[in-house]
Amino acid sequence: METVKEYTVHIDSKKRVTLRGAQYQYYNVKEYKNGCIILEPRELTVPEGISQETMRDMDRAIANFKKGTVSPAIDLSDF
């Protein structure tokens, strides 16, 4: 992999590192035992909607609930 930018950074008093000219707002961080840190850019997106499979599962769960096919009640009195 080709190096695009190389510079030295320091950790501030709150243990933060500043990335110069970062192209993304969010990064996934992987820290290894040998001290290497890998930053992978992440773009947060709004989901397009609920999938058809999820809608079928929800419909099946409601149908079971209406038929009375449910698990036994859970005793929460200990909490």
Image (cartoon, helix red, strand yellow):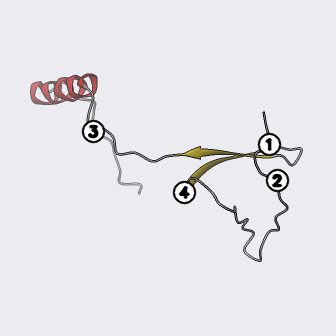
Mark 3–mark 1 distance (CA, rounded to whole Å): 59 Å
Q: Which mark is residue 6?
A: 2
Residue under numbered circle 1? 3
Q: Is residue 67 above or below residue 12?
A: above
Amino acid type of the residue tagged 1 in the rendering: Thr
The secondary element bearing badge 4 is classed as: loop
Q: Is residue 11 above or below residue 29?
A: below
The secondary element bearing badge 2 is classed as: loop
Mark 1–mark 4 distance (CA, rounded to whole Å): 21 Å
Residue under numbered circle 3? 73
Please identify, in this view, whether the residue under mark 2 or under mark 3 is nearer the observer.
2
Amino acid type of the residue tagged 4 in the rendering: Gln
Tell me whether circle 2 and circle 4 mark residues in contact (CB < 8 Å). Answer: no
**Residue 32 drawn at (x, y percent):** 81, 43
Mark 2–mark 3 distance (CA, rounded to whole Å): 60 Å
> Label 2 crowding class (10 Å Cα cut-off): few <14, some 14-19, many 20+?
few
Question: Does 28 sit left or right of 36 as displayed?
Answer: left
Mark 2–mark 1 distance (CA, rounded to whole Å): 7 Å
Question: Does 35 sit left or right of 28 as displayed?
Answer: right
Mark 2 vs 3, N-terminal side: 2
Q: Residue at x 60, y 50 (%)?
A: 27
